[in-house]
Image (spheres, rainbow, N blue to C red):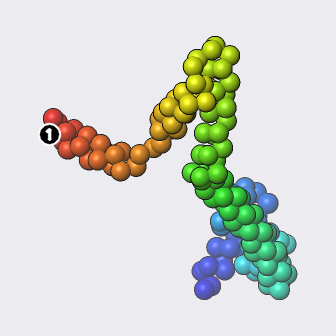
Amino acid sequence: MENKDSELSKIDLESCNKSELSLSGVSKDIYGYLLPKEHPLHIPPHVALVKMEAEVESIRVMLRDLDRRNEIKDRAKKFEGSWTRILFIMFITYLTLMGYMYLIDVPYPYLNAVVPTVGFNLSTWSLPHIKKLWLRWNEHHWNNNN
């Protein structure tokens, strides 16, 4: 312990940059309690503890904000695959195609707009099962050729 104290007393906190003294983002003035009482930058342990509590609280606030942001992103991601979004896009696509077909005098525009609407919707699907099969086949094919 004596060796550690003598090493710490040699540290001049003012000449060191913050990155050398910080531990996981904790500010350097908290480390002053490690210095001997005679050192000009020494701070009492109870003061360092108060500062540490403030640091911990700021970290808690940051984590809470990250959790809120992640929750919002998760909800947005759920909306991307929701039936509400899919049906709304299909409805808007159908109305657009029907209006266009009506303007160019396509017979039965109400009925003829259904096929391209369904086709467009199908083209946007990610098809995870087929993707998985393709990745397996591609990996097998790649390994056999190399």
Which quadrant of the rendered structure holds the C terminus?
top left
Frontmost residue, 123 versus 42: 123
Q: What residue type is labelled 1?
A: Asn
Find residue 44 and report its image quarter: bottom right
Q: Position of residue 141 (x, y in %)?
A: 19, 39
Q: Position of residue 62 (x, y in %)?
A: 75, 65
Q: Residue furthest left?
A: 144
| Residue under the point 76% across and 57% down | 15
Q: Position of residue 33 (x, y in %)?
A: 77, 79
Frontmost residue, 145 versus 26: 145
Q: In the displayed structure, does residue 87 sit left or right of residue 140?
A: right
The correct choice, above or below, for 143 with respect to 102 in the image is below
Q: In the displayed structure, does residue 128 sit left or right of residue 133?
A: right
Frontmost residue, 32 versus 110: 110
Q: Name the residue under label 1.
A: 144
Q: In the displayed structure, does residue 98 sit left or right of residue 134?
A: right
Frontmost residue, 111 versus 86: 111
Q: Which residue lies furthest to the top in this view?
A: 104
Q: How many marks?
A: 1
| Residue under the point 54% across and 27% down | 112
| Residue under the point 63% across and 58% down | 74
Find residue 11 and report its image quarter: bottom right
Find residue 27 and report its image quarter: bottom right
